[in-house]
Amino acid sequence: MLSSSSTSERPVVVVANRLPVDQVRLADGATEWHPSPGGLVAALEPVVQASGGTWVGWPGAADVELEAFDADGMHIVPVSLSADEVADYYEGFSNGTLWPLYHDVTGEPVFERRWWDAYREVNRRFASAVAGAATEPGSVVWVQDYQLQLVPALLRERRPDLQIGFFDHIPFPGWEIYARLPWRREVVEGLLGADLVGFQRGADAANFLRAARSTSGVVTRGSVIERKDGRQLRAASFPISVDTAALDCLARRPETLARAAQLRSELGDPEVLVLGVDRLDYTKGILHRLRAYGELLDEGHLEPPGTVLVQVASPSRERVEEYQRLRDEVEATVGRINGDHSALGRPAVHYLHRTFPKEEMAALYLAADVMLVTPLRDGMNLVAKEYVACRHDERGALVLSEFAGAADELRQAFLVNPWDIDGTKAAIRRAVAVGPPESSRRMRAMRRRVIEFDVHHWANAFLGALAMVAEPQG
Ligand code: G6P
């Protein structure tokens, strides 16, 4: 069993669009807290808990006014958004403009001036909330992700004493794509308010440095940026990871092992269980994956019910049109494959449109012979690392997109270009056929990577670099 390393920094104020928990209103009007979706929360929660820090964020529903409270070893500071702000700042500018633009235009970005105004306004509100929450002079504030790119500069205006870090969880696009953004200079200048701007991959940091030179006329030397006012900051890569020891420990529990065996038996004891786990998002390449998988069934290379695919697609951004369209297409495709290839009571594809607790996910990862992680573009993709962290038995095969940040580290996966359907089919066939000596060798090497470079290593590396560069001026 692995021992858990922890983040040994002083309390950090984390600022993210979402709190680690969402307030959900039930049919009878009562409210409940549910874990928030996505890799950002999964990665940061153990870090904030380990440092007894503060988390500033939105509770996930419109017009929820709440006082600060303490939960699970964290001080929680809710930031309220109105229904219009949810529509314009969150669904609009964050997820209708920036998300598709930053993911290499895998969806069509919409440039709407009203959305930009709301983005500026909400970023100001977050900056004010943080200025109040970071009570100690010289506190460390760590701003997260594309929804809050203006916060570093806005916060520095209010609190020049703070050490301000920013981490971008999603890709930062090349200049030819980024340059389309009508507010490209304002966004870069928001980020230049930080002392350290972190990215998933070296390529993202290089893209940002180029955008900073082109829009703000700053001078860069390696990762160092010299602003016109003489202040220096850095932009560099810090690949995010998972809490490997905690996942390894969860996956070794007798209940998890028993549940994994039970899952396989509920699925009819297939010879090969193939698994996909994604937020239902067009960047995740679910349709391309299903096309490849469907063709393998059509051609008889994989045969249900001996081979079964389980696709978990967790609901996401359901009021955004592009996500509604994607859901329709995914469900039509699953329906077609099942119509052609299922037997009574034995579907070829088990499609689950919901989220599961981490205990169930660990059992699914353990049960799966082949894990398909084939996004068209992804900042990191922590599902790939979670799978590896859970496979203490050194079994299982990972098919991984070259366009996920995780591909820079998990080189022993079966790497694919998800746009290449024939190539994806060939990789799935290789992963299905791989025998224990080779699959164990690959899995062992990948596990070495996620054991050494876990989420605590990521946080310590980022916060250590921030402390080096930040010069409190208070
Ligand atoms: C990605 C983003 C996060 C986001 C998560 C869930 O991981 O990088 O910032 O929180 O998706 O998306 P949602 O829109 O539901 O917060």
Image (tube, rainbow, N blue to C red):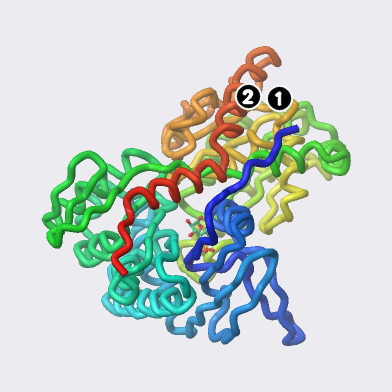
Q: Residue at x 54, y 82 (%)?
A: 62
Q: Nearer the viewer, residue 216 or 287?
A: 216
Q: Residue at x 34, y 53 (%)?
A: 197
Q: Is residue 22 above or below residue 378?
A: below
Q: Residue at x 61, y 33 (%)?
A: 451
- Left or right, 78 with reference to 434: left
Circle 1 crowding by C-alpha within 10 Å: few under 14, some 14–19, many from 20 = many
Q: Position of residue 263 (x, y in %)?
A: 83, 41
Q: Residue at x 60, y 30 (%)?
A: 398
Q: Is residue 407 above or below residue 135?
A: above
State the quadrant of the N terminus: top right
Q: Tell me the amino acid under the disc marked 2.
A: Met
Disc on the earlier residue, 1 or 2? 1
- Pointers 1 and 2 in contact (CB under 8 A)? yes
Q: Position of residue 198 (x, y in %)?
A: 37, 49
Residue highlighted by disc 2: 443
Q: Nearer the viewer, residue 20 or 333?
A: 20
Mark seen at residue 395: 1
Can you tell which quarter of the image residue 301 is in? top right
Q: Is residue 44 above or below residue 402?
A: below
Q: Position of residue 141 (x, y in %)?
A: 43, 63
- Left or right, 394 with reference to 172: right
Q: Which element type, helix, strand or loop, lies under badge 1?
A: loop
